[in-house]
Image: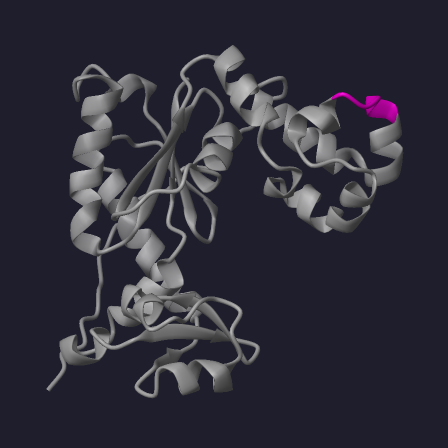
């Protein structure tokens, strides 16, 4: 099997900006999270704004800053639009989380000219939706998701993360990944850092029985699913029998 992970790190911000008139979308825009800035657009970055700034500080730096809030329903609709575009390349598309899609593409490679050809055509199909996409490939579903979320920094709307088509390559790449990439790793971040554990390689070097007693089976289960030593069944998206969409026009 071969999976493609598509991670959209700015999905909430991009979904909000899509609701704005063109002139407002050119202003500095940011999402507000508990009185602090969350994701910011490129114009906001040029004004010196960054995630984590307090609201008052941000407005002092950019008086014309436009602030919004994430909307789960709006974000879900945006992710669904990307999933529908991806269904043109494989029927095996599933949501990993609120910002990440997974595509099982092994059977589609010949049709689209190999992994590079499939990746390029998929990127072109998703581009009109206006999202920044981080893309990576791996022989496991969770491995592809982790590689797409943890990637070399880059610019532009498409960032290609590491691509691994064989399990040994995937395992070598994931050994360098930070522990907080795992959901259970984030839940136990303070304890793991207190033990001096930063990478998956350091985590895997410890006795499994001791890790299970301290952190539960969930942490090891995630590692095993990512590395392909445990099955990781997924439920794929199905197109609705009736399509309905709403488009709001600005006057």
Front residue (pair 250, 134): 134
In the picture provided, is 219 more to the left or to the right than 52? right
The percent coordinates of residue 160 (x first, y second) are: 33, 34
Front residue (pair 111, 127): 127
| Residue extent of the magenta highlight | 205-209
Q: Residue at x 35, y 36 (%)?
A: 135
So how many labels did they put on this image?
A: 0
Relative to residue 85, is residue 245 depicted above or below? Answer: below
Front residue (pair 115, 107): 115
The percent coordinates of residue 225 (x first, y second) are: 60, 26
In the picture provided, is 67 more to the left or to the right than 128? right
The percent coordinates of residue 245 (x first, y second) are: 22, 65
Q: Quadrant of residue 73?
A: bottom left
The percent coordinates of residue 242 (x first, y second) are: 23, 55
Q: Which quadrant is the N terminus positioned in?
A: top left
Query: Can residue 144 be spotted in the picture?
Result: yes
Q: Residue at x 73, y 23 (%)?
A: 204
Q: Which quadrant is the C terminus positioned in?
A: bottom left
Which secondary structure dominates the residues rendered in magenta?
Answer: loop
Q: Is residue 186 magenta?
A: no
Query: Can residue 240 be spotted in the picture?
Result: no
In the picture provided, is 242 more to the left or to the right than 160? left
Relative to residue 251, is residue 34 depicted above or below? Answer: above
Q: Quadrant of residue 180?
A: top right
Relative to residue 60, is residue 179 depicted above or below? Answer: above
In the picture provided, is 77 more to the left or to the right than 58? left
Q: How is the image coloured?
A: one colour
């Amino acid at each position: 099997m071969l999976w493609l992970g598509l991670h959209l790190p700015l999905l909430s911000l991009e979904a909000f900006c899509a609701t704005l008139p063109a002139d407002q979308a050119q202003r500095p825009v940011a999402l507000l999270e508990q009185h602090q800035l969350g994701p910011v657009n490129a114009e906001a970055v040029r004004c010196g704004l960054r995630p984590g700034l307090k609201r008052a500080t941000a407005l002092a730096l950019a008086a014309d800053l436009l602030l919004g809030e994430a909307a789960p329903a709006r974000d879900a609709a945006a992710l669904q639009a990307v999933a529908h575009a991806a269904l043109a390349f494989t029927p095996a598309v599933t949501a990993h989380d609120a910002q990440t899609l997974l595509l099982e593409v092994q059977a589609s490679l010949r049709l689209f000219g190999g992994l590079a050809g499939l990746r390029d055509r998929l990127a072109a199909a998703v581009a009109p939706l206006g999202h920044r996409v981080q893309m990576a490939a791996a022989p496991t579903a969770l491995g592809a998701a982790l590689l797409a979320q943890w990637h070399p920094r880059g610019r532009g709307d498409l960032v290609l993360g590491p691509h691994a088509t064989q399990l040994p390559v995937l395992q070598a790449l994931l050994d360098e990944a930070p522990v907080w990439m795992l959901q259970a790793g984030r839940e136990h971040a303070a304890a793991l850092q207190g033990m001096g554990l930063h990478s998956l390689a350091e985590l895997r070097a410890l006795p499994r029985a001791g890790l299970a007693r301290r952190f539960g089976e969930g942490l090891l289960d995630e590692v095993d699913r990512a590395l392909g030593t445990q099955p990781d069944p997924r439920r794929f998206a199905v197109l609705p029998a009736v399509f309905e969409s709403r488009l709001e026009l600005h006057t």
